Image (spheres, rainbow, N blue to C red):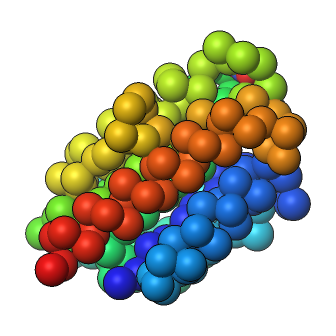
Amino acid sequence: MNIIGISGSSVKGGNNEKAIEHALDRAKEKGFETEKIKLSEKDIKGCIACDQCKGMKGSCSIKDDMEEIRPKLAQADGIIASSPVYFASMSSQLKAMFDRTLPLRREDFKLKDKVGAAIGIGRSRNGGQELAIQAIQNCMHLHGMIVIGDNNHFGGTIVTPFEEDELGKNTVDDTVDKVCDLLEKIHK
Ligand SMILES: Cc1cc2nc3c(=O)[nH]c(=O)nc-3n(C[C@H](O)[C@H](O)[C@H](O)COP(=O)(O)O)c2cc1C
């Protein structure tokens, strides 16, 4: 089974990339195949609402890195998305990516029943990590995904720097464990 981890930050080597690396290493230890998507390396333009994907299911008029990301998401069993908290929500980079998954929704809900989870990373305690997580989970719900938290609260919540937030790292670990456990139950 395959889990994709998406880092929604533009900062190369930053906290989100570290968190996704950490999460996927844990999934790998449990025998899952993993793949990282770092938005810091991707060119993803905003949706222009041309509605081409409405008429021609699955197709998008904008040719950028979403052309390779969409099929990867469509073949994943689980998706873990991490975002820096920007003004108490997810980053515009990650939102642009989710907006550009509309062709997958219009192609008979290609992300339906995939297990989804989120990580929110902010500089402040109570900086809006849960709001960023909720924004990500809302997108996942619109795809008909099976959205989970950390078995206790809403998902992975980190106060930067990632390396020093031991409590936060536990929430990331618990989130990954729940994604893996649920996938194992579903595919038994
Ligand atoms: C435009 C902008 C808005 C931000 N808004 C918040 C915020 O609302 N709450 C918060 O805790 N941190 C906020 N931050 C700090 C970032 O969330 C934090 O630096 C980020 O998680 C670091 O992740 P990265 O190293 O992967 O980029 C903001 C940073 C930027 C650049």
Return the x and y of residue 139 as percentages of the image width and height: 35, 44
- Residue drawn at x 36%, y 40% is 151
Q: Residue furthest top?
A: 126
* Most foreground residue, 152 or 40: 152
* Most foreground residue, 159 or 97: 159
Against 97, residue 70 (above or below) is below
State which quadrant residue 116 falls in.
bottom left
- Residue drawn at x 60%, y 61% is 23
The total of numbered circles placed on residues is 0
Tell me if 157 is positioned left or right of 17 in this view: left
Return the x and y of residue 172 as percentages of the image width and height: 57, 47
Tell me if 131 is positioned left or right of 148 in this view: right
Question: Which quarter of the rendering shows the C terminus?
Answer: bottom left
State which quadrant residue 132 falls in.
top right
Against 55, residue 121 (above or below) is above
Note whether residue 46 is visible. no
Note whether residue 77 is visible. yes
Return the x and y of residue 1 as percentages of the image width and height: 35, 84
* Most foreground residue, 27 or 124: 27
Tell me if 182 is positioned left or right of 152 in this view: left
